[in-house]
Image (cartoon, grey):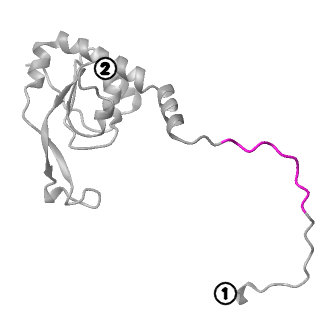
Amino acid sequence: LPNIYLIHGELTDDEMNQLNNDNKVKAFMSFTKGEGYGRPLAEAAITGKPIIVSNWSGHLDFIHPDYNILIGGELNEVHKSASNQFLLKDSQWFNINTSRAMKDVVKHYKKYFEKSRKQTQYLKDNFSFDKMVEKLNSLLPKVEAAPQTQTLNLPKLKKVEKKINLNELT
């Protein structure tokens, strides 16, 4: 079997870029139980290396099922010891089914690598900055800035001699 390294902790953007593009890194795995967009997964996917990921959560918006390995599973209640103010006791997590995906990727790496290159193009075609601007423009109403106008001729304020006691106002 290949060497497997678990990396935990905070890395700078530069360190993440170096890691994602290192020739020794052949594939990426994420068995997330549930999250939103998943930026680290998007950054890994753009490198064109195979992705092994749970078939659940926000990353399915940009991880194409034909170009990656999606691991099935089921939703289960979060264990009561894990619940807190952010993770409610009635929440559910996605738990993957046991998979042989890693062995299969090693055994048929060329096939998975070729598919993953299509994932890179899919991201570039559908999730680039320009594509996101285009999508947001189609979803959000266009607001035109008010045209420049000349100075308004408002009446002058009159000076009032009476003093107001703010403590008397309720």
How many residues crowd around disc 1 within 10 Å: few (fewer than 14), some, or many (20 or more)? Answer: few
Q: For the residue labelled by badge 1, is the local secondary structure a helix, a strand or a loop?
A: loop
Q: Residue at x 50, y 39 (%)?
A: 139
Question: Mark 2 — residue?
Answer: 119
Q: Judge whether residue 165 can be spotted in this image.
A: yes
Three-letter code, disc 2: Gln
Three-letter code, disc 1: Thr
- Quick one: quadrant of the C terminus? bottom right
Determine which quarter of the picture holds residue 104.
top left
Q: Residue at x 77, y 42 (%)?
A: 147
Q: Position of residue 112 (x, y in %)?
A: 20, 15
Q: Are marks 1 and 2 in contact (CB under 8 Å)?
A: no
Q: Nearer the viewer, residue 137 or 77?
A: 137
Q: Residue at x 92, y 65 (%)?
A: 155
Query: Height in image: 108 above or below 12?
Result: above
Query: Height in image: 156 above or below 45?
Result: below
